[in-house]
Image (cartoon, rainbow, N blue to C red):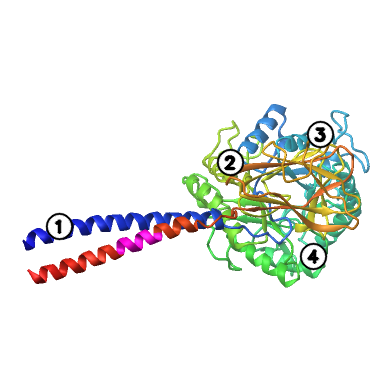
Amino acid sequence: MNRSWASTLRYRTILLTVALGGLLGLLAFVLIRYAVLTHGEDPWIPARTIPHTDVNPYGANFFLAREVEPWKRERTVEMAQQAGLGWAKLQFAWAEIEPLRKGEYIDPVSGESSWAKFDRIVDLCLAYGLQPIIRLDLAPAWARPTDSRPETPPVHFEDFGDFVYAFVEHFSGRVQYIQIWNEPNIYPEWGEQAVDPVAYTRLLKIAYQRAKEADPNVLVLSAPLAITLGEPHPEPGKWRSMPDLEYLEAMYQAGAGDFFDILSANAFGFDLPPEDPPRPDRLNFRRVELQREIMERYGDSDKAVWFNEYGWNAAPETFPEQVLIWKRVSEEQQAQYTLQGIEWARREWPWAGVFNIWYFRQTGQQYTPNEAAYYFRMVDVDFTPRRLYDAVQDATRPLFVAPAGHFEETHPGVTVQTGWRRKLSAGASGSAYLESQTPEATLTFTFRGHSVDLIARQGPDQGRLLVTLDGRSIPSLPSDNQGRSYLDLSAPATVWQDRWTIARGLVPEQHVLRLTASGDSATVNVDAFEVNASQPAVFPTPLVLTLGSAALLLAGALWWDIRRGSRRERFF
């Protein structure tokens, strides 16, 4: 009899335990689901408080000015767009634009405007969603000393300043980022002479002032410095190639901090992983942290750092050590380290902005397979994508859908059509905003979340923004006589960063917010967006109480059954 009762007790105990476990599991599911709905599926991404850092970090260097065939130019930028790149770093030679004499912009071969070739390149990049960053250097023969190298700076820096003014004026509204010269701390980028940070600072000052005269909204990048430990010049006390840290310090001492908006830097990884720590006597990816320390010491902590040339070289193992200027890694490591470096920077460096990978594709005219530089490429000359291209394409896919967080107008989730211009203002979120006076000019913001807010400028000069979400009008907003939902940005006084709630309680999936300037030609400004992954949820009190009570009753029954079984066994 004892065996029979014990068997029955075990059977009943198992049933009660399974039932209790199921109820507790269901209760846990309800509570977890409530927590997800309340607190969101995505972590909140805080605002990147340093201007010019809330951007698509992926860009690359291109040689489009050397490409003769138009179809190859177009195929190049088409592949760049498909890879998710947002930036095209380009070199436009002063010597090609103003070749024969000052103030004359004529191509000596074709007789057409020397601007025409560069207009086509800029327009092509913009058509494929690539923002151009233009490096300006290489003085024409008439501006530099006789028989000097093309990299030599002009005799009269004011001539370069006049060219910068003409360039910025010509491309106003199409090119917003210019870089002044390149690697002036090394031979031969400063010509056949000792490098001179004070002289470069003077050139930068003149170029900056003339650029801002032509367009106050243009952004000036300093010349990136070659990362080097230096090489002495034959003249005592001078440098043929000056260590980048010493050169940057000397620039700041000469007052350079007042004459650039973004610091441009180079970041090669050599044969070391991205996390390799920085040291003054070591060349690696994180060496830029030492440049950043100099910036902060001179009060420039509110400026971004953009990367002019970035990457790892994947030359073959058969190459001798003496030709591996940038050392080497495998092609798989090249792809892996490139992504890891950008991820590290976005996580650890709030001041990091654009990373221009060196390089996208060459024209076949500058590097041969016998040179180490050939093996930086993302795409072969014949348009075959390398492992690096594939890795970048995979990594950029999530960038174009904003999760929960605060996002500036430069975020890759924002797509801007023609008719909008980016303007700088200390009062705006991120120190810049988008402005349009063009009727029907449209921009979109793609996001994933339960709610979306718009941050914009309100004032007496402001008009209406037509608003749709996923192609539909929004019932919670007012409608015009055509049934179109809108936001009225007009107000008696100007208010920066005013906030409008566009939608709440959305299904947590991808949405597209479309903003269109109304047809009245009034000014409209768009500053930033905020997305929340959480939504108000009604706590399921009756269900939780029911499940909880059932679980308690079952637990009590199980305890009583076990106790009763124990007493019965003792009795028998």
Q: CA distance from mark 3 to mark 4?
A: 52 Å
Residue picked out by circle 2: 378
Residue picked out by circle 1: 8
Nearest the eye: 518 or 326: 518
Examine the residues drawn in magenta and state their main secondary structure: helix
Image depth: mark 2 or mark 3 in front:
3
CA neighbours of label 1 inside 10 A, class few (<14), some (14 to 19), many (20+): few
Identify whether 552 is placed above or below 517. below
Q: Considering the numbered disc 1 on the image, is that residue within a helix, a strand or a loop?
A: helix
Residue 482, which numbered label? Answer: 3
The magenta span reads: 548-555
Q: Upstream in the sequence, badge 2 or badge 3? A: 2
- The quadrant of the picture occupied by the C terminus is bottom left
Q: Amino acid at mark 1?
A: Thr
Q: Is residue 376 visible?
A: no
Q: Considering the numbered disc 3 on the image, is that residue within a helix, a strand or a loop?
A: loop
Residue 257, which numbered label? Answer: 4
Nearest the eye: 120 or 562: 562
Identify whether 557 is placed above or below 103. below
Q: Quadrant location of residue 437?
A: top right
